[in-house]
Amino acid sequence: MDLKYTPQEDAFRGTVRAFLEAELPTDIRAKMRLGKRLRKEDLTRWQTILHRHGWGAVMWPERFGGSGWNIIQQHIFEEERADVGAPPQNAFSLKMLAPVLMTFANSAQQQYFLPRIISGEDWWCQGYSEPGSGSDLASLRTAAMRRGDHYIVNGQKTWNTLGQYADWIFCLVRTGSEGRPQQGISFLLIDMKSPGITVRPITMLDGEHEINEIWFENVQVPAQNLVGEENKGWTYAKFLLTHERTNNAGIGSCKRALKKLKEIAAEQMAGGRPLMEDARFRDRIAQVELELMALEVTNLRVLSAAANEQNTLGPEVSVLKIKGSEIQQQLAELQMQALGPDALPYLREALEMDWVADPKFSEHYRTYAPPLSGHYFNLRKTTIYAGSTEIQKNIISQLILGL
Amino acid sequence: MDFSYSPEQIALQDTLQRFIDRDYVFDRRRELAGSALGYSAAAWTLYADLGLLSLPFQEEFGGLGGNAIDIMLVMQLIGRGLLLEPYLSTIVICGGLIQDAASEAVKRALLRRIGAGEIKLALAGYEGSGRYDLSRVDCSATRSAGGWRLSGRKTVVLDAPSADYFLVSARTGGEADEAQGISLFLVERGSVGLTLFSYPTQSGGRAADVCLEEVTVGADALIGADGEGLAIIERAVDKGIAALCAEAVGIIAALNEATLNYLKTRKQFGVPIGKFQALQHRMADMLIAAEQARSMAVIAAVHADSENPAERRRAVSGAKAYIGQAARLVGQQAVQLHGAMGVVDEVIVSHYFKRLTMIDLSLGNVDFHLARFSDTLR
């Protein structure tokens, strides 16, 4: 038991840092730092840069073109990535779909899709939730009927993240109605350019377009796009969700957010003193920082235990998901609270880089301030998506506690 | 980074667990808590034989050269077994202090005897008006012929009734709340002018208020430099805090196991009460708290040996503040989920709960340590 990084790990961190400092485009970095809107082009450009350097998928094994880094190396990369202000990569493709493809897909699928993911050529989105199937995901009804060499897909997916950018969608579809609802589900890869697909934006509480509903009307999908076996999709879906939840601990991003919170609290004034000197506010920061200190170690304990058992992640990731999502929310809330009354203005245009405040007023309005309230509102999603906190507690109850 | 335990550490845990299962079952523990001594003298001898009492000391003083993680593991088992022996006071705090700060002569004179189980020590550091502030020292030490004369009062000195020696903080200069001017003295139990008001604690241990009236000690009783004692005491207490964190984590784990077992066996409305979602989610919260608390105890342990006071303080105060809150959650909910069985003396749950509560109140509670941690934030 030792929490110190080895000299090799420290050197590795130096290498990662130097690369990020040198290669992260300054315009993307500025957007991240100031909480501005990122475009698809920003994200794919960054993925391409990482890929050129051989770091397109640091969590993948080398045989699939990944970096083959161990848990600690991945953790260091994620910390530095967030601290420098590089955007997170597309987790839907790299961290959720890819492990499913590596584990359950045939080699033709692996050889076609994985290189296109790592290069940034294909943008993937997820088709899981439906209007009637949220927490009770297995009740999903989007149907895929086999017709010769094709499936014909009909139905509706919702709460889809960034589908407006996507080239492909991985979907859970119903292929059977026998037995328990879990038994008739299949895992299908669908080209978003297919005729019959309609993407409709859902404006979220922060006023932004991040989420969509997707309609499928007699969409023809080649049968070769089925992953694994028909009607075994639930197994793959659960496997994917376990990976999704680890991803949600978000330690690196939380550390960055904590740092930003302290910077804001040091700059915002209350009663003529920096807010950071107000013990009442500082204690609230302290409480979140303690949660984060603990979660960082809990996260590494869980991941290294999994690494010792051939990377089998278990229900323990529910603990990480619950805590990680709560911490993200608390940090966003405190960032907003730190602004006090200045959190009220709703300046959508301020989310663009070219926004300039009227110079008569700009001195008071810090450039970091306008996005913070929207960020708080936006992050209410974290305890709802990827299995709500209540679902995670059900998982802990059943699979860890045996209740 | 490495999150595994060595084979020796695993063996150490197994040995202690077997001892608890065999010789320190709950009924036996209750007897001991109610006995005149308040702990098991036989157990203390056994700990010496097992090497537990010399675990953290350097080999040249007969020790095993164990590290903070070894102590963490021992303390977790002490928590799990609700062991009453004065390990924290004698070995972790006072033994640690002597090893870190005493002269070669004192180390030679005491560490082997401590390790052999021959003598016990207690830290007399807190005073009535200071709450958890170790720098609030009114107790005075003035030079006398060939030594020092100590007068003052120390409150809630843990494990004082069984101590053969006290480590007493006393002021040799400065004002009552100044960091400078505090010195540390080794005072023998039988010294003339030293009296104890002894009592059991809420969690079964023993403690006393200690009164010193013109107690004379030799010049060699001074530990560390004259007026520079506070840093020495704080370092030892920080080790004690890390140890208490580990003890709490051991109890939290045991309490969760007991509660989970109860949820699976207690039936109401025709089903085990663990079938009810309201209770399941409570139990899930307790599990999460336990995992997070365990991580904090590791953080405290690996920094407890640090010579950098700021780094040490951030880790141990952070851990104590966090674990105090986690322990409150787990303790209160364990009692609640046990229903009426949680509030009786004859079930171990209430004893775990009381020990967790008293751990919070010892060496600085949640408020104290949260403030200390918060004040370090940059």
Image (cartoon, grey):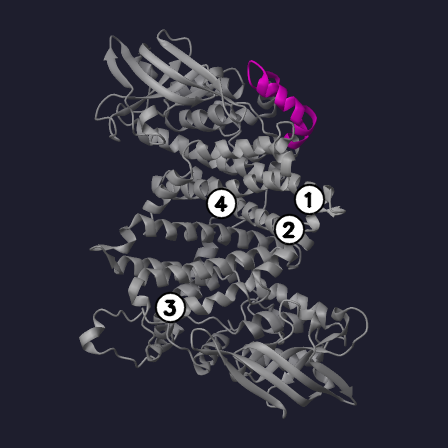
Q: Which residues are magenta?
A: B16-43
Q: Which residue is labeled 4 in the image?
A: B296
| Label number found at residue A373 | 3
Q: Is residue B291 visible?
A: yes
Image coordinates of residue A251 in percent, x first then y, are 48, 59
Of all residues shown, which one is farthest toward the front? B269
* Mark 1 element type: helix
For the N terminus of chain A, give its image quadrant.
Answer: top right
Query: Vertically, is B112 above or below A355?
Result: above
Query: Vertically, is B281 above or below B111?
Result: below
Query: Vertically, is A216 above or below A395?
Result: below
Q: Which residue is labeled 1 in the image?
A: B263
Is label 2 in contact with label 1 (beta carbons under 8 Å)?
A: yes
Q: Nearer the viewer, mark 4 or mark 2?
A: 2
Q: Earlier in the sequence, mark 4 or mark 2?
A: 2
Q: Marks 4/1: CA distance?
A: 27 Å
User: Which amino acid, by three-letter code, is at mark 4?
Assistant: Met
Parent chain of label 3 = A
Q: Nearer the viewer, residue A351 or A87?
A: A351
Image coordinates of residue A232 in percent, x first then y, are 75, 72
Q: Nearer the viewer, mark 3 or mark 4?
A: 3
Q: Check if residue B36 falls in the magenta segment.
A: yes
Give me the residue at 50% from left, 53% from top. A295
Q: Which residue is labeled 2 in the image?
A: B280
Is label 1 in contact with label 3 (beta carbons under 8 Å)?
A: no
